[in-house]
Image: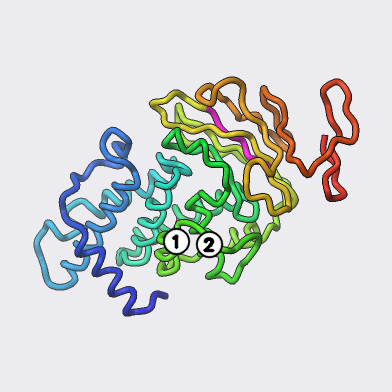
Amino acid sequence: MLYPEIKKNLLHVLLTHSGNKLHLKTPGTLGMMNETENHILMGETSRYLKNQWLREHGDTAKLFDNSRNGLDEWWMGCLAQKFEKGFYEFNANPYSGYALTALLTFHSFCHNPILKDKCSQVLDKLFINYAYGNMQQRSFPVFRRRLEREKIKAFKEDPASSIMKTLMQKESLFAGNGKIEDHLHHALLTHLSDYRLPGTALPLLKGEKESFFMKIGHQRNSSPEIYSGNSDYLLSAGGAQRGEVSQIVARPVALFLNDEAALLQDCFYLKGKGKMNQWNNTGVFKGFACASANVSITKQYSPLKELSGWQLVKPYSDTNFI
């Protein structure tokens, strides 16, 4: 639960910094050509909550009645689309943080129980997928958008990680590095939210994972996320670049282990062939990964034997890798 005074002040900020200026569009038209997804979610959250407050405080105008002005219907369609097809700006850095905190805010203040429940379903699915696609709150997924952000090699840069760490702290879970170092504004809004992680996500976030293989689709002509792993490792496919207009940023295939690696160069990884804008790094299957490039081996691993281009690598632990 939010502290009453903080909740009151936060809602006041939302009301004083919002207005009925955005043109409503059907959920099917959400996209880059109309307005960015995170802007739409932030704007429509503010509009909905302002209307709700005015209605509950005596304004009977249709413009501010979400059940009559189309906003209830719009939000149900939008949330259904997010649940069934995912987000357009998937894993976006930094934009996904704003989309997530918009939904967390909507969940906290929306008084329509049907919409609040649907919002919970969307957030539950997203965070369960995140729990599978990360190891100790480290992830390196394919994302959309801003091609120049391909240069980011630090795992802490994902805003979803800061949000997830905050949600885990609310459940007294501290697996891996629980320190929140970036995206503190998202962490604060998450802390104030009344949303709680679903019970099915908690053991996954504690590292209790059976061997799994999963693909997360992002609609036609996009790029999937592909993961394989268990409690000891995670293989993360880097995705496929679909041209500059798609704004999909493919990344190397990465292998995460039970260590403290915080940068890509501290892990085993596979780049794609040629320039980044031509990569197709979707070669991950059950416990297996391949790409048209040599494996990049971090310095703390030394080769024991080499034959015909294959190396047997001895790390600082008792595990061997080929």
Main secondary structure type of the part rendered in magenta: strand
Q: Mark 1 points at which residue?
A: 184
x then y, percent, for residue 229: 70, 45
Q: Quadrant of the N terminus?
A: bottom left
Taking the image as shown, residue 279 lies to the left or right of residue 184, namely right
Does any portion of residue 212 appear in the rendered image?
no
Q: How crowded is mark 2: few (under 14 residues within 10 Å), some or many (20 or more)?
A: some
Residue type indicated by callout 1: Leu
Q: Magenta region: which residues?
A: 235-240
x then y, percent, for residue 14: 25, 63
Q: In which quarter of the image is the C terminus?
A: top right
Q: Which residue lies furthest to the left in this view?
A: 61
Q: In the rendered view, tell whether residue 150 sits above or below residue 159.
A: above
Q: Mark 2 points at which residue?
A: 180
Taking the image as shown, residue 180 lies to the left or right of residue 103, namely right
Occupied quadrant, residue 206: bottom right
What residue appears at the point 74 percent right and 36 percent down from the top-left corner? 297
What residue appears at the point 65 percent right and 39 percent down from the top-left corner? 254
Residue type indicated by callout 2: Ile
